[in-house]
Structures are given as C-alpha cells and as structure tokens.
Image (cartoon, helix red, strand yellow):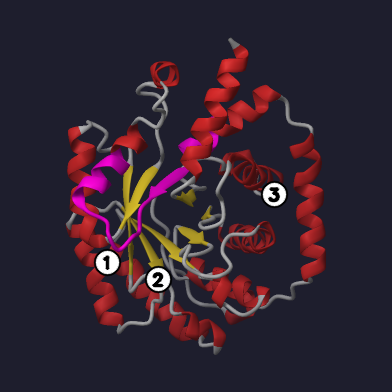
Amino acid sequence: MPANQEIPLDLKQISARVNLPSVVRSVDLLTSPLIRSLTSQEFLDYTLQALRLTDLTTLSGDDTAANVGRLCFRAAYPFSNFDAHSRTKGTIHTAAVCVYPSRVADACRALKALKMDGSIEVASVATGFPSGSYPLETRLQEIRFAIEQGATEIDIVIDRSLVLTGKWNELYDEIVSMRKACGDKVHLKTILGIGECGTMVNVFKASMVAMMAGSDFIKTSTGKEAVNATLPVGLVMIRAIQKFYRMTGKKIGLKPAGGVRNVRDAIAWMILIKQTLGEEWLVPELFRFGASGLLDDIEKQYCALAKQKK
C-alpha cells in the first residue's frame, strides 16, 4: 500500500470522550459469542492467519547475528514438525521480522540467504526505543541508519511526556519529521506506549495525531511497559482509525504488541477487527501482531489440530 502522508493537524478532530465500562462491554459483545462458537476448522484457519500477520520480534540486549539468523529462519519456516513443515513449505511465513537498528543488516543477510527477501519485511524499532526520550535529531538519525541498513518498515516510539502534557502540536511535528525521514517507500508504525499515556482519551488523541502526521500504522506498545495490548484499548484505537478513514478515505493499520501470547488472544483481536473495521483489514498491510512468543503457541495449536484431522 502507498505510504500515508501528513495532513494538517486539526485539534477539533482529536477531541473525544471515552466511557471505559462501555468500551469493555462493547469488546465482550463483539468478541465473546463468536469465540465461543468457533469450529475446529475456523480455529485452524485463524491460527494460520495469525501466523501470516505476525511481526516475529527479538528486542533483547543480548541479540547477536546468530540469533537474528535463527529468528529469520523461524519466520520463513515456522514449523519444526516435519509433517507441518512439508504441508506449508514456501506458502506460510510471518509478515516481518522486527529487530533493533544495529541488527537490521543481519536480518537482511539472513533473509536473502533464505531467498525470502521481498517476501518477509524487515522492521526496525527506532527513535530511542523504548522510552522515546532522546533528542529529536538522534532519533531521526536512528531512522536513517536503520533504512540505510535495509529496513523496509520503521516502528517509531513517541515521547509519552508530550501526550501527558497535552503538547499535541509538538507531538505532531515530531512524527511529521519522522515520516519525512522514512520517505515514501518505508512504512511508518507509530508506537503509542498506551500503558504510559495516562488515559483512554489520551490514547484516542495520540492515535489521531499520529495518523494526521503520516503514520501508516498505530501500534499499542513497546512490550516493555507494565500495561501493553488489551482489547479495550484496541477498540479505542480502532474508533480513531474509523474516524480518520471517514475524514480522509485512508486506511491506517493497527498493530497490537505485548500481551498477545497465544492463539486465543490473537483470535480475539482478529474477531474484533473483523467486527469493527471489516475483514478487509485482516491483511499484513493493515494488521500485525508484534510478538516473540506467539509463534510457539501457533505451532503447538496448528500441529495438534492438523493431527486430529488425519
């Protein structure tokens, strides 16, 4: 999909009121009945879909070229079980791998060796991840470095102090500068750090500002906060995406990250998307899971279900 471009910041459009108990009830009404009624075939289909929508992630201080290479192999060939591997070889893989800027070149080399460059995106966190509390110029340099190393997607993290103090113009200007650093070829995912935004109203406002500033995705979390991706916060972000779509006709993606650890968590998110934004959003261009452990449960569930069908 073509990269989003900034539009003028309209502070009137970011205002909102959020009734949290109502949001929680809405999530339950939208997801619980469908989750309870899933057939085994539907569960299997969702399991494979979750795999295709995953950004397989390693963001550890002890990352090396070797473990990034293993991550890329797992992204390309997700099933260690021989039968499952044979059935899906070459057809099932994750959407992307996500690494630190210093490991981007390692990921690109590994995917090229696997002949999966162009099939699996290379995403890099940037802009002082996970805090975002660094001088703007160093954050922009980090984006440029990651792109020079081969990153095709950049996951920026905002400075949450700007959200907490209501400095929406400054937040907008920073994200616009990051959008420009990415250019029109590299997709920009904006991490809100929802657990550190203070209120659901702030989450909605930050979502709107990020989209107006040119973000292609809005992403819940770094995975390092105490509170990460939850369905209620996801619904608030979805309402912002819907509003932006009504305003502009532009489809913006959503990426829950942190807290999506098993297939049932992933299915709840996919059903929420299907019930609100529509099935057209359930493609890698518009929806991703940021996860490191989700793939383990996907493999476990897929192999168990496939065995039952024999």
* Stretch in magenta: 48-72
- Residue for badge 1: 143
Find numbered disc 1 in the image and state the secondary structure of the residue it sits on: helix
Q: Quadrant of residue 305?
A: top right
* Rendered image: mark on residue 130: 2
The residue shown at (59%, 81%) is 11
Mark whose residue sits in front, 3 or 2: 2
Sequence order check, earlier mark of 3 and 1? 1
User: Looking at the image, how many numbered discs can be counted on the residues?
Assistant: 3
Residue nearest the observer in this picture, 176 or 89: 89
Mark whose residue sits in front, 3 or 1: 1
Q: Quadrant of residue 154?
A: bottom left
Whether 53 is among the magenta residues is yes
* Rendered image: mark on residue 276: 3
Whether 50 is among the magenta residues is yes
Q: Position of residue 35 (x, y in %)?
A: 74, 38
Mark whose residue sits in front, 1 or 2: 2
Give amino acid for label 1. Ile
Q: Position of residue 24 (x, y in %)?
A: 77, 61
The residue shown at (30%, 84%) is 135
Q: Can residue 47 be seen from the camera position used here?
A: yes
Find numbered disc 3 in the image and state the secondary structure of the residue it sits on: helix
Sequence order check, earlier mark of 1 and 2? 2
Q: Residues within 10 Å of mark 1 (few under 14, many from 20)?
A: many
Q: Position of residue 223 (x, y in %)?
A: 48, 62
Sequence order check, earlier mark of 3 and 2? 2
Q: Residues within 10 Å of mark 2 (few under 14, many from 20)?
A: many
Residue nearest the observer in this picture, 169 or 134: 134
Give amino acid for label 3. Thr
Image height of 170 relative to 185, above or below: below
Q: Position of residue 15 (x, y in %)?
A: 66, 78
